[in-house]
Image: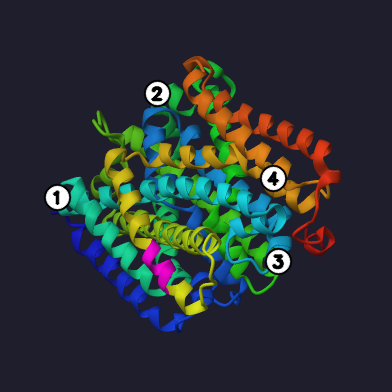
Amino acid sequence: MTVMFWPVVVFMAVSLAIGIYTYTQVRGSGTRYAVCGKSLPFVVVGTTLMAQAVDGNSTLGAVSISYTGSVWGGLMISLGLGASLFIVGRWLASPLNRMNLLTLPEFFYRRYGKATELLVSVLTIVSFTVLIAGNLSAVGWVLSVVSGSSYLPALIVATIVIVTYTIAGGLYSAVWTDFLQVYAALVGFVAAAIWLLSTRGLDAMVAAVPAATVDLSSLVSRESGALVNWSGMLALAFGNAMALDFMERVFAARDGRTAQRGCYYSGAMTMLIGVCVAVVGLAGVASVQGAADPRMVLPAMAVDVLPYWIGVLVFVGVLGASMSTANGAILVISVVLARNVVQRWRAETVSDGGMLRLSRLMALPTAVAAGLVAWVRPEPGILLIVAFDIVVAGCVVPLFAGVYWPKANRYGAVASILTGTSARLIAHFMTPPEWAGLDTLVPPLLSAAAFYVTCQLTWRSEESRHYVLTEVVGEGA
């Protein structure tokens, strides 16, 4: 047990208490559970989006990547996440908010039909299960460090706490706990970066690390990993347009303008935190020598290098950021399973109250599956990139085209999804190590080609459309 144990325990207990209290806000409604009655103001939308972007992958995982590779490699996680929020804000937030959707796969149902919705639901469920696993892994590691226990018991405790308050309050639990959790991360990492820069100086830290940690070769040289870094950032930037948790907050905003402004605010704050994390990662390379496990570099910095109160904020910041993202992702997967899979493919309609019960039930297998992935492969930074590689390969093109291209139809959407996903799976096994990164970049291009050609060949035979395009694209798009 370390000196960080009780602050972390208190933080988790307060988060659990707040989350359980939000049970009173749901009021037996599946719609309130999923999107808070579509009433969120700007500051809440911006904060909750930031809480989903800033997580264990972009903090603990980014520092691990900085330690084993370069600071730029770790920073590009936050840059990709921040860029994705600007992309969503500029092109998707306003039109999708006006559609009054409850889940992102529902857009594909209205635009392309039932079969396409099922394909997208399956892919995003797989993707977000991996995302949850990355964040449960981060929480588990923090708990194991502060308690002195092994990783597995800490992972089990983390999973139980998060799924409990997710089931209780749905999106309300995410909204109420996000303010505590993400602003702890913001204050902690900003304070850590300021303290390190003022006491050590940037030049001194740069001089104390290997040249490969800070030079630009990881951005411009394929041999130094530039292709991997850029492909990962692009996958995050565009793949997060398919982020179920991002879009749930966009749908819950009270109007399109609010959703758009919330995206811009959260994008800027995500990049700010990413820069601060990069400073901590740089100091970690200089201060923590010979770490056998790079995932322990950030905890070592918090305990042994930073002042106690800043170390506590960093610890609870990583914990809170990871908890908020895992909470939001468990919620959206459970709602997608309930609404877009179970309800859509059964004969009778499920009532609003029945949908609430079903959504809560679906959270349990979701948490178990993510926990198993986190136990088998506890790699926060890598898991995030893998998660969005899955969806960027096949689903992003039909999403954007469905909003902006009148000829987009279900035949093109299915061709695009199958082509992109199949190409990504094949590329995973066929791409030579020296060309790693192309397995991320090429499949979306093939997906776009399949979509365009198929739509051009079939759009005149489309029997009906699920909505009128001019009703979706409007002011703010």
In this rendering, which labeled residue sits more in front, label 1 or label 2? Answer: 1
Q: Which residue is depicted at the point 67% across and 34% down? A: 447
Front residue (pair 179, 325):
325
* Location of mark 2 (residue): 210
Numbered circle sitting on residue 398? 4
Q: Quadrant of residue 107?
A: bottom right
Mark with earlier residue (4, 2):
2
First in sequence: mark 3 vs mark 2: 3
Judge whether 50 appears above or below 228 on screen: below
Residue for point 40% across, 84% down: 24
Q: Quadrant of the C terminus?
A: bottom right
Q: Amino acid at mark 1?
A: Gly
| Residue nearer the viewer, 237 or 335 | 335
**Which mark sits nearer the N-terminus, 1 or 4?**
1
- Main SS, magenta residues: helix
Amino acid type, mark 2: Pro
Which of the two discs, 3 and 1, labels the residue nearer the N terminus? 3
Residue 12, located in which quarter of the rendered image? bottom left
Q: What is the spatial separation of the Cα atoms under label 1 and label 4, in whole angstroms?
A: 48 Å
Q: Amino acid at mark 3?
A: Met
**On the image, numbered disc 3 is attached to which residue?**
99
Q: What is the x, y in percent for residue 142?
A: 27, 51
Reading the image, the residue beneath label 1 is 148
